[in-house]
Amino acid sequence: MKTPSTKMNSYKTGNIIRKSLLYLFLTFWALVVLFPFYWMILTSVKDYGKYNSEYVPKMFTSSPTLHNYVSAFKEVDLSRYFINTIIFTLVTTALMMIVIVLAAFAFSRLEFKGKNLVFTLFLSLMMIPNELVIITNFVTITNWDMRNSFAGLILPSITSVFYIYLLKENFEQIPDELYKAAKVDGTSDLGYLLKVMIPICQPTIITILILKVIECWNSYVWPRLITDDPKYYLVSNGIQEIRENGFGRENIPAMMAAVVVISVPLIVIFIAFHKKIMAGVSRGGTKG
């Protein structure tokens, strides 16, 4: 018969084995996920001649070089793509935050006739396939003669039904007593929004902000449809252009260098704010 001490030792041993297997699996999965990034960076620092002479790809290089990064900026207008993407990202994100904050406040705190019906119809827009929306937006922007312009790039992206819903659910968690007290003190609706609701829901707002920045930076399909002028290419379209022209197909290390340069801002943003993203998402999904 096993003594309590033996049972405790068996439990501890089993717990250690389970944790060891879990960490082993997580380590393996992390290596699988991170390997493409390692290969991208490794290729970007390989000499062009040595890369072409490798019949069997090597997992390391003894003589890394930064010449590929110089070539990436010299052979293609990568700096222009960066500037275009920064302008597109900042303006789109700023306009979207204004729209969704005001919309979420209206649906969560203001009372008007048919509010629930309007919000239900609003949510039903999420059921429409994105391809249909893109076609409609493309026809609209083309009819408005906004192709190959920042206005055409930005306008279809300044709202999001999902983000409005997420922020509305967050706003509704704030007690009504705060709103009534603010109204008694003579605070306007806009003042209550700016001084009370936004500070309280800051984690969710920051999360939406970061996710929108990432979405804009990675935007590909819409910019590809609405722009055929290299002056308005974003970094995603720029990479496609590099791949399709002779330079990208011939000089793979330089193309990988361009991809690394474009990926670094998003990686830095995610590493710096990943805790806020997780906190904002969990807060937005919790009611009560």
Image: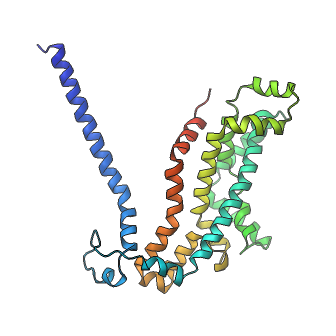
Q: Is residue 120 left or right of residue 20?
A: right
In screen coordinates, is 86 left or right of 273? right
Horizontal and vertical percent for residue 232?
67, 75
Could you tell me how many numbered marks the image carries?
Answer: 0
Q: Quadrant of residue 174?
A: top right
Residue at 73%, 35% (x, y): give it: 197
Q: Quadrant of the N terminus?
A: top left
Say which of 217 and 131 sits in front: 217
Q: How is the image coloured?
A: rainbow
Q: Nearer the viewer, residue 136 or 9?
A: 9
User: Residue 207 appears at what percent x and percent y?
Assistant: 60, 46
Q: Quadrant of the C terminus?
A: top right
Report the front residue among 6 and 154: 6
Q: Nearest the camera: 52 or 141?
A: 52
Residue at 20% over, 29% down: 13
Percent position (x, y) of residue 139? Answer: 73, 68
Q: Residue furthest right?
A: 186
